[in-house]
Amino acid sequence: MLDAIIKEFGLDDEALSIIPLTQGLINSTWKICGKEHAYILQKINHTIFKRPEDIAQNIDIISAYLKTHHPGYLFVSPLQTADGKSLIYKEGDGYYRAFPFVAGSHSKDVVKTPAQAFEAAKQFGRFTKLLAGLNVSSIKITIPSFHDLGLRYSQFLTALNNGNKERILQSATLIDQLKQWSFIKDQFEEIKNNPAFKLRVTHNDTKISNVLFDEADKGLCVIDLDTVMPGYFISDLGDMIRTYVCPVSEEEADFSKIEIRDEFYKAVVLGYYEEMKAVLTETEKDHFFYAGPFLIYMQALRFITDHLNNDVYYGARYAGQNFVRAGNQVTLLQRLFEKKNILENIIKEEK
Ligand code: GN1
Ligand code: MG
């Protein structure tokens, strides 16, 4: 199948090797290395992205806007087939698309230094800033209510009623903690009703592997625009806090390794703020700390909900993997709340 796809993108003369890249829980990705050029090939998970054409359309709109208004931005456009399509649909299989691999660039799987966290945060801030003049409602919603914390909470409650009984019993402590934190969801409802909170073009998947760096380790641009949608800035800032600030990932089962590294937190805040200070409202700026709890809490809810629903969304490589991930995120949020005063002071200094 991959050979046929590669051929349709006109890469078959060149293609020498196909290396699967294992990053990401949702889409499948390969690196295609030709004699002179390399490419990234992706298969979109269309049980999750129900309308991949909407992703393609968003990419076209964003690409056109940036070319006109910010021609200096390095925008990685998808390859087109001979008949001008950027998505190939294979009956009974799925949707594929490909991108040129930007020469001299690299991506990272883990954040190793505060400087890298700063660069990445700056790139995500820059992306939203450069698109601030684009009419957000022209951007399609590729996953409805993706970061709607109210919906994630009600999906959690539904799983408590209809989910795997044994798993519900085993997860009692975690479930109790998540219920006690429901004020985080209430705060989100207030945000949704507050006109000082703007819907912006947000990326919604700000993990470090979605940033391209140059050889000097400076950020070049962001990639993987599947989940780019109208959203609140707390989604992007929050997911960076969730994934850059702790030395271990959501997969870590030894929770004693979970900690908040102040220097990394500071770097994320500073990098994002540097770009976004010109566009955020004062009310938004007052919610920098909230971004962390918002996103970490949502991710904990999503993992435990999936565990209670027998792993239908994320899948599990071992029994209880989503339980571990949920526990990991709950611990991360506990660590974050413990440092609330220190972190709020960091935010104040940067503003
Ligand atoms: C999924 O596939 P990946 O790893 O880029 C998920 C994100 C979660 C993340 C948790 C479409 O992203 O929202 O934060 O897993 N993407 C989707 O690792 O659900
Ligand atoms: Mg992704």
Image: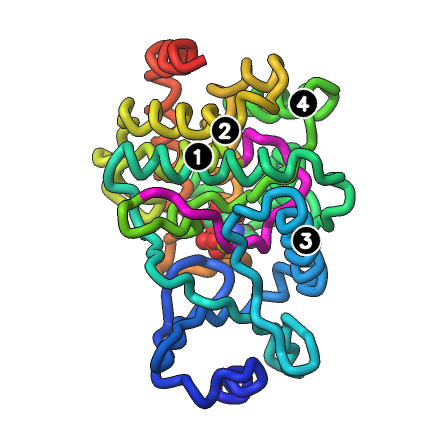
The amino acid marked with disc number 3 is Ala
Which of the two discs, 3 and 4, labels the residue nearer the N terminus? 3
Of residues 327 and 33, the one nearer the viewer is: 33
Disc count in the image?
4
Please state which of the two labelled residues, at mark 3 or mark 4, is closer to the viewer: 3
Q: Which residue is denoted by mark 3 in the rendering? A: 64
Which of the two discs, 1 and 2, labels the residue nearer the N terminus? 1
The amino acid marked with disc number 1 is Lys
**Considering only vertical position in the picture, is 344 above or below 317?**
above
Question: Where residue 220 sits: x, y (%)?
Answer: 42, 47
Q: Contact (CB < 8 A) between labels 1 and 2?
A: yes
Q: Contact (CB < 8 A) between labels 3 and 1?
A: no
Q: What stretch is highlighted in magenta?
A: 218-235
Residue 152 location, quadrant: top right
Q: Which residue is denoted by mark 2 in the rendering? A: 275
Image quadrant holding the C terminus, namely: top left
In this picture, residue 228 sits left or right of residue 294: right
